[in-house]
Amino acid sequence: MTRKRVDFTLENVTIEAVAAEGKALARVDGTVVFVPLAVPGDVIDIHVYRKKKNYMEGTVQRIVKPSPDRLEPFCSHFGVCGGCKWQPLPYGMQLKAKQQQVYDQLVRIGHLDVPEITPILPSENTTYYRNKLEFSFSQKRWILNDEDPSSLTPEQMCGVGFHVGKFFDKVLDIQHCYLQASPSNEIRLFMKDFALRNGLEFFDLREKRGFLRTMFIRTTQDGAVMLIVCFFHDDKVWIPRILDAVAEKFPQITSLYYIVNPKVNDSITDQECILYRGEDSIYEHMEDLSFRIGPKSFYQTNSRQAYRLYCVARDFAQLSGNEVVYDLYTGTGTIAQFVSGRASKVIGIEYVPEAIEDAKDNARRNKISNCEFFAGDMKDILTEGFIGEHGKPDVIILDPPRAGIHPDVAEVILSASPKRIVYVSCNPASQARDLAILCRDYAITKVQPVDMFPHTQHVENVCALERKETTAK
C-alpha cells in the first residue's frame, strides 16, 4: 500500500524537541509533525508532504525565526548531502538527544528494567573523526537548485562524492568533507581532476557503463593511508596510469589497491583486491596491541572512540583472568584481543572469512595465544555441540550488526548460561528487542551510551547483564 501524499504549508510552527531518526518534532492542533534539519526553538513554515492519522511529515520551507540554539552549518553541502544532519544542533544538545534515544528504546518503548543510564561518552573529535570513506564516480551527478542542467557540459555533469538519499544513481559532487582528515579531500579532488583531464569515463550506475566506479580511503591515527580504486573493466593502459599518478602526487599513500568490478552492484566483498603498490595493510593501535586493516577489513570508523567503547566493554565484563569469554560477531578480533589479557581463553566467531583471517593474523602479530577464531553463520556455529567442544562461556560479549541477533542465537546464549553478558550495539532499537529475550534469565546492571558519530543521530550503546540467580546473591 502506498502512502497518500499531500501538499500544503503550516506557518509559524515552533519546533519543540529532537525526535527519532534525527528529525525534529512539532505539534499543530494536537497532531505531531516530524521535520528534518530543524532545531528546537526554531519557528518555521513547514511544507507537509505526508499526512497520516496520528502524525504528519514535512520539510523546512522557511525559517521564520531561528532558535537561539541554532548554529550555522560548517559544511557547504549541508542540507543536500545525507550525512551530518545535526550540524545546526549544538553538540551538547546532540548528546542529550542520543541519551534520550537510548532511554526511549530501552525503557519507554522496550519496557525494560534498567538502572540509571550513565551519561553518554562524547567524542573527542566532532569533525575529521572517520578513518574510512567511500566515494562514488558518476556521469550524472546531483544537480543543485541554482544550476541550469541545460547549460552544463558533460564534464560538468560528472561528480565524485556520496550517493544522494532515495536516488541510487545520483551522486553529490563533494568539494570538502569534514569527516576524514587530510589527505582524503585532496586525493578525491585529484582523482576527479585527473580523470576529467584525460577523458576517462565516470560510471553510469543506471546504464551500467563507464570506467571509474568507486574509491575507498582508509587512514590510521599515525598517518598511514590506504587507497582502493574500483574500475568497471580492466583497462591495461589507464589503470596503471591513474594509479601511478595518484601515488606520485601523494607519497603518504602507504597501501594502494585496485579492483575490477564488472558486477551490477558496488559491493567489493566478493571481489579480488589487487595490491598495486606499497604495503598490503595498514595498522591501528590500542594500548600495546596492533590491528591489521586490509582492504576488506572491518574496523570501527572512529578510532579514538573505538578505544573508549572497548574499554567500557572490558570493564563491564569484570574479568579476573580465569574466565572463558565468547566474543560473538568478533569482526577482526579487536574486542577479543583487547580483553584477552584478562581472560583464560577467548573464542571469537564471525561470519566473514576474511575478517577471521585478519583476526588470526592480528593474534599472531600481538603474540596472543589464548584466542581462537571461527568463521561462519552465528546461528549455525554457536550450537550446544560447539560449546561442549570449546568450553562453557563464563562471559559472552556480542557486537552484532544493526539488525541485532537471530532469535536462535539468543536461545543458545540463554542455554549456555554465562555468568555475565556484555551487549555492544549500534542500534538501541534492535538491542532492546534482543534484551527482552535475554532478560528472561538476566538482569541489566549497567548501561553506557557512546557517541561514535557526531552530527548524526546514530549512537552506540553498551549494556551489562548478569544472570538473575547471580544477581540475587
Image: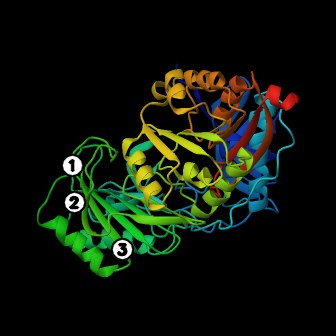
Characterize the local packing of mark 3: few (<14), some (14-19) or many (20 or more) Cα atoms within 10 angstroms.
Answer: many
- The quadrant of the rendering that contains the C terminus is top right
Q: Nearer the viewer, residue 385 or 404?
A: 385
Q: Residue at x 57, y 68 (%)?
A: 128
Would residue 219 be found to the left or right of residue 257 on screen?
right
Query: Residue 67, how many percent across, how many down?
Result: 80, 59
Tell me the CA gap for discs 2 and 3: 24 Å
Query: Residue 59, how many percent across, how many down?
Result: 64, 45
**Amino acid type, residue under disc 1 in the picture:** Arg
Mark 1 vs 2, N-terminal side = 2
Placement of 396 over or under 238, stated as above or below: above
**Amino acid type, residue under disc 3 in the picture:** Ile
Q: Residue at x 44, y 71 (%)?
A: 185
Tell me the CA gap for discs 1 and 2: 9 Å
Labels 1 & 2 near each other (Cβ < 8 A): yes
Placement of 316 over or under 111, stated as above or below: below
Q: How many marks?
A: 3
Mark 3 vs 1, N-terminal side = 1
Secondary-structure class at tag 2 = loop
Secondary-structure class at tag 1 = loop
Q: Nearer the viewer, mark 2 or mark 3?
A: 3
Disc 1: which residue: 209
Query: Residue 426, how many percent across, how many down?
Result: 62, 44
Disc 3: which residue: 253
Secondary-structure class at tag 3 = strand
Tell me the CA gap for discs 3 and 1: 29 Å
Q: Residue furthest top?
A: 1
Labels 3 & 1 near each other (Cβ < 8 A): no
Disc 2: which residue: 201
